[in-house]
Image (cartoon, rainbow, N blue to C red):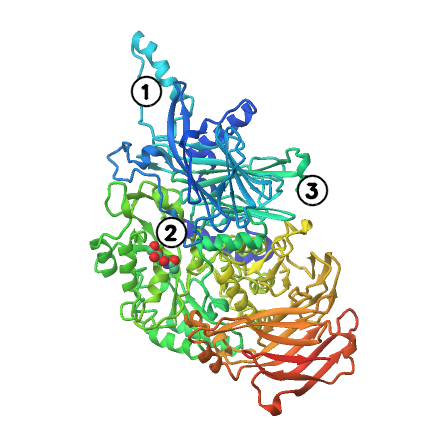
Amino acid sequence: MKMYSSSASSLRWTGFFLIFTTFCCLFTPVVMVKHENFKTCDQSGFCKRNRAYADTATQLSPGWTSPYNLDPNSITFKDGQLSGTILKSVGTAGETVRLPLTVTFLESGTARVTVDEEKRQKGDIVLRHDSKAKKERYNEASKWAIVGGLKVSTGAALSRETEAGSTRVHYGSSGQHEAVIQHSPFTIEFKRDGETQVKFNDRGFMNIEHWRPKIDKPVPENNEGEERAPEKVKEETDEDESTWWDESFGGNTDSKPRGPEAVALDISFPGYEHVYGIPEHASGMSLKETRGGDGNYNEPYRLYNADVFEYELDSPMTLYGAIPLMQAHRKGSTVGVFWLNAAETWIDVIKSKASTNPLSLGVKSAVDTQTHWISESGLLDVFVLLGPTPKDITQKYGELTGFTAMPQQFAIAYHQCRWNYVTDEDVMDVDRKFDKHKIPYDVIWLDIEYTDGKKYFSWDPLSFPNPKKMHNQLDKRDRKLVAIIDPHIKNTDKYPVVEELKSKSLAVKNKEGNDYEGWCWPGSSYWIDCFNPASIAWWKTLFKYDAFKGTGPNTFIWNDMNEPSVFNGPETTMPKDNLHYGNWEHRDVHNINGMTFHNATYEALLERKKGEIRRPFVLTRSFYAGSQRLGAMWTGDNLAEWSHLAASIPMILNQGISGFPFAGADVGGFFGNPSKELLTRWYQAGTFYPFFRGHAHIDTRRREPYVPGAPYTDIITQALRLRYQLLPAWYTAFHEASIAGSPIIRPNFYVHPDDEKGFAIDDQLYIGSTGLLAKPVVTEGADSVSVYLADDQPYYDYFDYTLYSGAGHHTVKAPLDKIPLLMQGGHIIPRRDRPRRSSGLMKWDPFTLIVVLDSAGNAEGTLYVDDGETFEYQQGAYIHRRFQFDKATKALTSINIGESGAKTAAWHKTMAKVRVEKVIIVGALDEWSGKTEVVVSEEGAKESARRKKVGFTYHPAQSGRAAWAVVRDPKVGIGKGWKVDFS
Ligand SMILES: *[C@@H]1O[C@H](CO)[C@@H](O)[C@H](O)[C@H]1NC(C)=O
């Protein structure tokens, strides 16, 4: 959800859809984001000031000198940490501002640079307007975002070769990293193996807006005043002060009690042409330049979580979530920076011809990417990750901010949502229709209308009189219900939730320190402040089964509107001078706000009933670095248009490489009615979203998969079955994300980091480490797609084994009923082939293994299986196997790669009867033609079954299709060690 429908706009929408229905396909509706509701850089004082600062530095260059100097006498180095004081020169009288610096070298090879401001740190400042806000720069972002990886390096050491004017530190696992800190002006170069990868303040844009008292300019009244004024005012008026003390936008005034306090820094990546990351934006994966020019943006990428309704594509505008992680990539190297700041942030990107460095031509790109990061408040706190591979970046970033929570299995199956299923009967009817049409689904969703007058934790007594019965029907097929719970709490009488929120003082406060009241779905509302530990404790009580009556173990939660969306607030969110727990201003914590609410709900679902421990599932719209620990996200309110279908792929890929891969987009498009063709193609694409949910706006027509009829319903059903068939592969990819931070769907550059032609490709994807390569159709009327192959391995069509080989583009047929999906040679893909009504019903089903041979005749793959529900996998209750086909020995083997724990044996016993029922070998060897049996052996099998023969069928290659073979029912246990001998 949602659109902000004032009555005028919903009238407009109703009218619009009437017309739309009448003319249906005659014209394409033009819906546009309301640009005037959101700031441009020019309208955001600190962004404008810092861009102007950068322009001045650039214009004066090389005559420009950054006024930041590290005092050499202040430098100390101890236990992997360098400390010192940066002196910022202000004015002409030699006056300086003291900025404490720490550079921490971590065991992981990551460096962290933190700059604070002494006066604010000590609280030695005066707030205006009698503000109760904290005086310090916000220093708790790490408390929310960081969960590990901070172990300090024991090997980091000052370099013995000293040079006047700089300090060098060697660090990294074998001392291969080096930080060269120049004192005057202050800059840092981060090197790996002697080559510079990342530079700080190279262009001199570093800017820490220090505290100063507001000086009301004297109004010159007489000669004396005129003489004195210029000198005093001169120093201040060098800069544009107009947005220092208060700022208005869209009828709201920000009182800014601490004055200007932005932090900014230029970060350059020499020799890197591509930078990725910093979601969430509706833009391509390889980031564009932002300072104008052909095909470039004119605005910086913005991170300021907001309910941007009817968002625009190919735009650097902010959206609902923010992950300030950027990675730069070139052949042979990937590096990253993580800008740990929760305030409004803008990032400029420009690319320029590489500065000529004859020593370092080689694999480097001829282009440098230069970025400029600008945040409104808080510390300057940046992590530098030196790779050298894309995998290293996602792994090390994950060690810092946490890995994806291992979801329950149902959560990665198909979800059916709309705004709204209007009654409990409606829900049960939709459920029956899925069954009637034999369409699999796991979860049905309820949007805001299920509540009694938008009071969360209640049911509308007329439309949902019997939630228990509804849950029970769903449970018969192991299905779940997800209900929405938002952070705005209705301000109304006789609503215990709001009464407790107020009496316990757990709401976000306004600048005066009273409960902040604003407007959202329920009308007048308060917002729970989940920065407060007491709020989390209270929130937990609301989800207990006996508190949220009508819910049960198969109820899960959707957190929407948690940017937060405030209909009458500036930029549809909270005033920046609102106060949170600890008296931090909203300005400081804005981008983390959504994550704290998501966190509270996650924690609440852990404790709904004593002794019951199921993995929570909570979907969020707003997110920050670390949200991956808590659940899934989706890309918000998209449109039922082909362009939005296309845009979903790069957006979800970008989430994956930015540490939050459990991502999806509303299948079908939220606003508007998709054509049947668009709906069908969207389901086919959605099959490849890690989070796979159909959703629709309240003003749209019903569009459940059984609605469009022949042939569409059948085609959509096939797409859904494909998802269910491949759930073992998806689940294994999620497991990998949960232990290594790897993306679940992966872009070309991540899988083939040295393939320069593929660096900007963001319209095709690999599923985990399976070698499955999909290129969803995202255009109308297509009957083929062009798939890019990065290497010379054989690639086989998933459905008919048509062979494609040779690096470059290949045309793959894609009529409406065909999903372009290839298998890269060299992999073994686990699946479950029996169609079922939900994933829960597949629990004891046998497995099929697809062995896809590479050009050398080898293949390998992994499988992870646990109970799909509980946390017992943490005690070893899982199966983790590596399957390997080896050309030399002509054998397929299954090897344990799991570790044993207290619950391993019991889980293996439970799974003892679950077997492999089929092995398909694609690219089968010629020598197998005529072969009719293979020999199977299994560990621990009875003597008589130790070497048993099972049937084998060989199908020769024909008309472009590869040879393939089938091992019929080897009956080996999925959790067992075994061998199939083809010799
Ligand atoms: C949620 O937040 C609390 C308080 O900061 C923290 O202790 C807890 O670990 C968080 N939960 C998760 C799953 O990150």
Judge by depth and name the residue closer to the eye, 39 or 60: 60
Which quarter of the figure is the C terminus placed in? Answer: bottom right
x then y, percent, for residue 390: 58, 52
Q: Mark 1 points at which residue?
A: 217
The amino acid type of the residue labelled 1 equals Lys
Q: Position of residue 327 (x, y in %)?
A: 55, 47
Mark 1: secondary structure? loop
Query: Which image quadrant is residue 489 in?
Result: bottom left
Q: Mark 2 points at which residue?
A: 144
Describe residue 96's horizontal placement relative to residue 162 as left or right.
left
* 556 in relation to 115, above or below: below
Q: In the rendered structure, which disc, 3 or 2, sits on the residue that comes first in sequence?
A: 2
Q: In which image quadrant can residue 640 be found?
A: bottom right
Amino acid type, callout 3: Gly
Instruction: Indicate which label's residue lies in the foreground, 3 or 2.
Output: 3
Which circle's residue, 1 or 3, is located before the other in the chain?
A: 1
The residue carrying mark 3 is: 362
The single residue placed furthest to the bottom in the displayed view is 944
Residues marked 1 and 2 touching at CB (< 8 Å) = no
Which of discs 1 and 3 lies nearer the camera? The answer is 3
Can the viewer see residue 869?
Answer: no
Q: Residue furthest top?
A: 223
Q: Please give left or right for residue 184 compared with residue 576 in the image.
A: right
Q: Position of residue 730 (x, y in %)?
A: 55, 67
Which is more toward the observer, 42 or 129? 129
